Image (cartoon, rainbow, N blue to C red):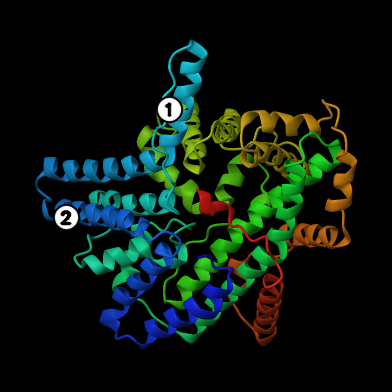
């Protein structure tokens, strides 16, 4: 089930909200957990057992850590069990097929027998998100950043909460532990949540989907003329931003409707003046998670410049693999890790800081744009083909000129133009919704209505981050 669907908007959400508010305080978490499991199991009910198993392990480990404050070995063992269990689940379901494919490539090259007729594993939705979120609980309890939850239902609610279950933001336990015990439900908070949801829906339906159609047309065409290749890459950059930030807005909005305040996940990332700044603005919940739970434990920047570069490389390579089991994601992470290390050669400032800010913003966006090619294409040969098209290093294939008739239609050009204005001129949803007026509320209602009208006519409606 996805947010931008009629079954969610017209049936699931109204029933879930009505039930949640009608339930007494002590039963709200139970009701929310039930609806969250229904939401998650809508596509494949078997996956709920996997999430329940992960939840049970981390709940038990958290209790052991909390109850054995004087027994260091018991606490460490519980923490290790939690981390190993979560990473094992993530590793098996996300990287088993990738490992077999690469094993067969190597054995085929060596002339050895291939591993055939092997089990093919289906990737559960959102496993990358809820394993990181659940794992943060035991780590935070071990560090003393939050008290262990005694009630299993409360913890199950935290892990499975449907607003951010399958595509984030990754809500750490330390950020929400107090809210699980005590939070307020106000009209102002609900109204702001509705505004978040309406704006997120508009980003997804009105902007991400049209941009995605352009990107798909170009990337699936093979070798095209340079202008079309750049246009398609730009469309994908817009698609992934509006798709993911739109989902995050809807998730934050739904959380507010339920009384929770989730962390900001995007902050105008394409306005960044360096790659370092880009990762302070893009998918903030993931970048901060990797920083605090991986980069800092590895030593961060405390062990000299060389070690800092190595740590940045490790974190970004693993961050790339977190997004998907493909060498393209590794390369994408390597590009960003390399740029982060290169920028550190001048300390914390960008190595091109002496240039005017418009140049730095443009250069950063160009680097991000080129890196997105590896993120979008299915394999390395496809990425190379598209890069050849972008830089005019190969002759476009026969019939490539026909692509222009599909991607430069007035409607697509209009949506791309609006996307440019929204990205570089409009305020962030987080700031715009802080003080709602009647005019703003009316604008949100209009955008939601328009989005639902357009949604009824769109056959193309994917959520990119659902596959991660």
Residue nearest the viewer, comparing 308 with 287:
287
Residue 279: give x, y in percent of width and height: 56, 45
- For the point 80% across and 40% down, the residue is 229
Q: Which mark is residue 116?
A: 1
Label 2 sits on a secondary structure element that is helix
Residue 218: give x, y in percent of width and height: 77, 44
Q: Image quarter for residue 372?
A: top right
Compared across the picture, whether 69 is left or right of 364 comes to: left
Which residue is labeled 2 in the image? 66
- For the point 57% across and 34% down, the residue is 340
Compared across the picture, whether 433 is left or right of 355 comes to: left
Residue 191: give x, y in percent of width and height: 54, 82
- For the point 25% across and 68% down, the residue is 153
Instruction: Tell me if mark 2 has few (under 14), some (14-19) or many (20+) residues whose alpha carbon lies within 10 angstroms of its own.
Output: many
Compared across the picture, whether 382 is left or right of 79 comes to: right
> Which label's residue is closer to the chain start, 1 or 2?
2
Q: Which mark is residue 96?
A: none
Q: Image quarter for residue 120?
A: top left
302 versus 114 height, above or below = below
Measure how far apart labels 1 and 2 are at the Cα level: 46 Å
């Amino acid at each position: 089930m996805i947010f931008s669907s009629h079954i969610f908007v017209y049936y699931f959400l109204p029933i879930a909200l009505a039930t949640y508010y009608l339930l007494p305080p002590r039963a709200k978490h139970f009701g929310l957990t039930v609806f969250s499991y229904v939401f998650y199991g809508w596509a494949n009910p078997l996956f709920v057992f996997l999430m329940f198993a992960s939840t049970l392990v981390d709940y038990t480990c958290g209790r052991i850590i909390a109850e054995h404050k004087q027994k260091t070995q018991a606490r460490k063992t519980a923490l290790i069990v939690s981390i190993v269990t979560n990473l094992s689940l993530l590793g098996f379901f996300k990287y088993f097929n990738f490992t077999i494919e690469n094993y067969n490539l190597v054995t085929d090259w060596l002339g050895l027998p291939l591993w055939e007729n092997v089990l093919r594993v289906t990737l559960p939705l959102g496993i990358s998100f809820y394993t990181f979120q659940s794992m943060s609980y035991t780590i935070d309890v071990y560090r003393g950043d939050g008290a262990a939850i005694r009630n299993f239902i409360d913890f199950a609610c935290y892990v499975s909460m449907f607003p951010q279950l399958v595509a984030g933001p990754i809500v750490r336990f330390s950020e929400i532990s107090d809210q699980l015990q005590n939070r307020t439900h106000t009209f102002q908070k609900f109204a702001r949540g509705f505004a978040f949801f309406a704006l997120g829906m508009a980003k997804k339906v009105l902007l991400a989907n049209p941009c995605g159609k352009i990107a798909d047309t170009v990337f699936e065409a093979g070798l095209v003329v340079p202008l079309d290749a750049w246009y398609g890459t730009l469309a994908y950059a817009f698609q992934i931003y509006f798709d993911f930030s739109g989902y995050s807005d809807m998730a934050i909005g739904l959380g507010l409707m339920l009384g929770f305040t989730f962390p900001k996940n995007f902050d105008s990332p394409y306005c960044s003046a360096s790659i370092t700044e880009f990762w302070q603005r893009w998918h903030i919940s993931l970048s901060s998670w990797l920083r605090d739970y991986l980069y800092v434990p590895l030593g961060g920047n405390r062990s000299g410049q060389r070690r800092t570069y190595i740590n940045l490389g490790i974190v970004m390579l693993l961050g790339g693999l977190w997004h998907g089991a493909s060498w393209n994601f590794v390369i994408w992470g390597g590009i960003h890790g390399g740029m982060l290390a290169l920028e550190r050669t001048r300390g914390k400032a960008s190595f091109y800081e002496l240039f005017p800010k418009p140049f730095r913003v443009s250069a950063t966006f160009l680097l991000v744009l080129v890196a997105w090619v590896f993120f979008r294409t299915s394999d390395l040969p496809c990425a190379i083909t598209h890069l050849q098209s972008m830089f005019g290093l190969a002759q476009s294939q026969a019939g490539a000129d026909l692509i222009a008739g599909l991607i430069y239609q007035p409607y697509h050009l209009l949506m791309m133009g609006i996307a440019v204005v929204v990205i570089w001129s409009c305020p962030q949803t987080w700031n715009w919704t802080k003080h709602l007026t009647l005019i703003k509320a009316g604008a949100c209602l209009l955008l939601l209505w328009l989005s639902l009208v357009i949604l009824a006519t769109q056959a193309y409606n994917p959520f990119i981050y659902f596959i991660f």
